[in-house]
Amino acid sequence: MCDMATIVTSREFVRKFSSFKKAAANGNELVVKDRGGRRYVFRSEGPGPSLGSQLSDLCGTLSTGVAVKNLSGFGRNRP
């Protein structure tokens, strides 16, 4: 994201919390504005996750020994 704080409504914050949480973990600041006009700052307090941990989340950390794509039983008269 950018260096400036992003301003969002409280409704949008609730709907997209997981993506805003990741952005805050990467060092970005988020300003949440409610209906009354009050503003709240949302930011992470520790270092963000390392690139290695982010990539391990994407590819999966548990090896099951089963191929990801398996066409057994697909279609008619196939074992």
Image (tube, rainbow, N blue to C red):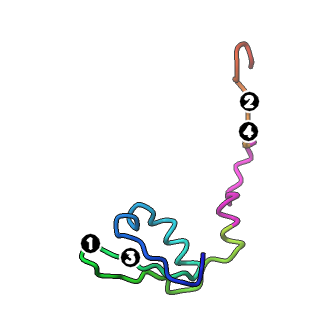
Q: Secondary structure at mark 1?
A: loop
Q: Which numbered disc, 3 or 4, marks the residue closer to the eye?
A: 3
Q: Nearer the viewer, mark 3 or mark 2?
A: 3
- In this view, the residue in front, 64 or 47, is 47
Q: Quadrant of residue 10?
A: bottom left
Q: Residue type at mark 4? A: Lys
Q: Residue 56 at x, y = what percent?
A: 69, 64
Q: Which mark is residue 69?
A: 4
| Residue carrying label 1 | 35
Q: Which residue is mark 3?
A: 32
Q: Which mark is residue 71?
A: 2
Q: In the displayed structure, would residue 2 be above or below residue 58? A: below
Q: Position of residue 19 (x, y in %)?
A: 52, 66
Pick whichever of labels 1 and 4 is earlier in the sequence: 1
Q: Nearer the viewer, mark 1 or mark 2?
A: 1
Amino acid carrying mark 3 in the image:
Val
The x, y position of residue 7, in whole percent, is: 43, 76
